[in-house]
Image (spheres, rainbow, N blue to C red):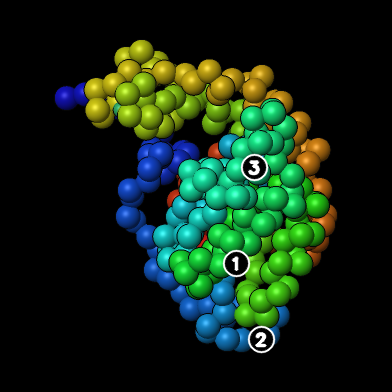
Amino acid sequence: MRILPISANFGLNSVRKNNTQTRVMSAMPCDSVSFTGKNESLRKVVILLGAPNSGKGTYARKIAQSFSIPQISTGDILRKELKAGSELGKEAKSYMESGGLVPDELIMKIFKNRIAEKDCAKGFILDGFPRTVNQARQLDGLLAEDKNISLKIVNLDVDRPILYARSAARYTCEDCSRVYSIKEGYTPETAKCECGGKLIKRADDTPEVLTSRLENYDKQTLPLIDYYGSKVSNVGVHGKDAPADETLARVMEKLQ
Ligand SMILES: [Zn+2]
């Protein structure tokens, strides 16, 4: 028998890139404060804020499953437009090919199209968006066009040493890209993926890369906490890391 030294600390034991886990929490009725008061048919819009490694993506996936709403990230919608070869996609491509950032205005146009799609009728969860105060302002304008929205904003406030520890423990299967968190005292050399693949450290998963991502985050995204002010619900992980399930339950509480 192969022993997998996997910590249950992060990523719900393991995170598949194309997540197929089906464990969901029961969906609860939507009776939150909204622009229009209590209404069961409100579109649930969730914004998750948090630094790199805060677990945002993992939780976004779980919340999306729980509420049966899609998870929307800028990367995904950009890739989709590029693949479709739409006019907006071509415009975005020209920026990307010249090594520049896709302007917020263009991202907003693509985003507007995305949330007009049928699967967003009940709502959607934003993962890594808005990234800047400028994007947040434009998003406000867009959401204000729909009076039938219940907006929830949750900030994952995780201590920096914990973010670094998660990065240090994370290994990826060379063959199937499954992500593992290696417990202290074990070495990835003696561990193997369920598929038999070798566990490796990804080149972009180093303390240096994390430091630079955190610097960007502090500069661009952290100001969103002030921007949204009292609308933000904080879920903190302080001192030592908490089991992902526990943190998810606390996030879900804030979304009721
Ligand atoms: Zn594998």
Distance between the alpha carbons at the discs numbered 1 and 3: 25 Å
Residue 239 visible at all: no
Pinpoint residue 174: horizontal percent, then vertical percent: 36, 21
Q: Give the answer, above or below, for where 132 lies relative to 151.
A: above
Number of the label disc, if any, that sits on residue 37: 2
Give the number of the disc on residue 45.
1
- CB within 8 Å, label 2 to label 3: no
Q: Position of residue 162 (x, y in %)?
A: 61, 34
Check disc 3 and give the amino acid type: Ala
User: Mark 1 and 3 residues: CB-CB less than 8 Å, in contact?
Assistant: no
| Quarter holding residue 55 | top right
Q: Residue at x 74, y 49 (%)?
A: 104
User: Which class describes the residues within 10 Å of circle 1: few (<14), some (14-19), or many (20+)?
Assistant: some
Q: Which residue is mark 3?
A: 92
Tell me, for residue 78, which label it has, or none.
Answer: none
Badge 2 amino acid: Gly
Q: Does dot 3 land on a helix, a strand or a loop?
A: helix
Where is ligand 1, by quadrant?
top left
* Residue at x-position 51% and y-position 72%: 121
Give the residue displayed 33% in from the left and 29% down from the top. 176
Give the x, y percent position of residue 85: 52, 45
**Rounded to the nearest whole Å, what is the CA distance between mark 1 and mark 2?**
15 Å
Query: Residue 231, image x and y in percent?
Result: 74, 65
Q: Earlier in the sequence, mark 2 or mark 3?
A: 2
- Determine crowd level at label 2: few under 14, some 14-19, many 20+ residues with C-alpha closer than 10 A: few
| Amino acid at dot 1 | Val
The relative height of residue 32 versus residue 170 in the rendered view (above or below) is: below
Measuring 58% from the left and 37% from the top, which residue is drawn there?
A: 53
